[in-house]
Image (cartoon, helix red, strand yellow):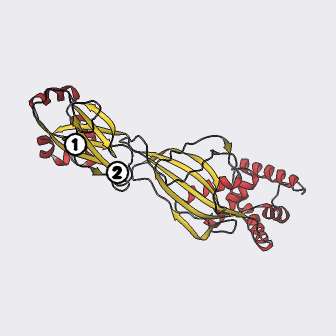
Amino acid sequence: MNIKSIFLFIALLVILGFTSGCVTSGSSTKAPATPAYQPQITGEKSLYPDEQVAVTTLALAKKGILPQNGVISMAPDATVTLAQPASGFSVTQEGVTGIRQLQNGDIAVEVLCEYQDSLGRKASMLDMVTYTLRHPTGQEATTVSKNMVAEYKTTMENCTPEMQQQTMESIKTFQTSAGLTPDGVLGPQTAMAMAQGMEFQEFTGLISAPIYSTTPRFEIYFIDEVVAKSAPDTYLKGFNSLETVRIKAIPAAQFAARAKSGGKYLALIYFMDQLPKDTPIQIGLSEFSTRKDNDRKATMKPMYATGRDWPVVVAPFSLKKVNSKLYAHVLISGKIAGTTKLK
């Protein structure tokens, strides 16, 4: 089945009711590009046919298949900026989070996709598909009805007996509602009635925007600086070293004893959630469990998250016979995101 046939058949299935009501949706009035926006997959209502077509079109577009026929098509000036997950990530959850009408009259459907890799890193992407609806002209209805009949015949010849029976029953239902003879066959008269009653769906945008957690997860480990720098390929290769660092890092129970004698160490912080570009990240050492504003002497200069990566911060620090309590604070944008007791 070619691309035009795929989308024509989607429209036919929607009319016959095979695809409506399969995905649930809620409502939203916020734009997907706002990092603070935390969409939730809800189950308030079933999707209308055009909304289900939008979700299906979005899924196909992410595989590189765009609509090319009159019933379901792309606007000439449509914006397509869909993002794919990083290599090694798989979908853990996906669903509609909002449906609304934009100020320009377009309908927008938002779909949240959550991904995770084997290390436990997570990414969230909000996809938005926008479109308009209109009734076909007489000539368009004639063309569509002829194509529907041809595609119907091909499909019926190649589908299972169960699908054939389901199709016939659905066509009968439509024919009865349209005042036609309910013979279960999609002939020219039935196809024309369908074509005249359908709405043409033109997509104006297929857009992705990352969603950032308001409480990003991270893991922090401490390694002897000499050990780490003697084997940089083992300890200092970003996430490629995480599994080894998890095993070789200094246990918290041992660090207290080491702090008394002092030494040079590296703090390695692995962020398991994405951060917005240019987010300042710092680590500060303090004798206080809640960091005080004037306690900045042991705080490293900010490092910044970049692009779509999951940041890994490597911070060197020295200890000289620490006898008081000692805490390591991880700061994101100047605020404490987590604290580890070292002594």
Q: Is residue 2 above or below residue 83?
A: below
* Label tally: 2
| Quadrant showing the C terminus | top left
**Does residue 62 appear anywhere in the picture?**
no
Residue 108 at x, y percent in the picture: 62, 56
Residue 146 falls left or right of residue 3: right
Amino acid type indicated by mark 1: Thr
| Tag 2 residue | 279
Distance in Å between CA atoms under marks 1 and 2:
16 Å
Closest to the observer: 91 or 180? 91
Residue 304 at x, y percent in the picture: 30, 52
Residue beneath the point at 60% across and 58% down: 57
Residue beneath the point at 58% across and 64% down: 66
Residue 131 at x, y percent in the picture: 64, 61
Residue 104 at x, y percent in the picture: 64, 63
Residue 44 falls left or right of residue 137: left
Closest to the observer: 78 or 106? 106
Q: Residues within 10 Å of mark 1 (few under 14, many from 20)?
A: some
Q: Secondary structure at mark 1?
A: loop
Amino acid type indicated by mark 2: Thr
Q: Which mark is residue 167?
A: none
Residue beneath the point at 72% across and 47% down: 162
| Tag 1 residue | 299
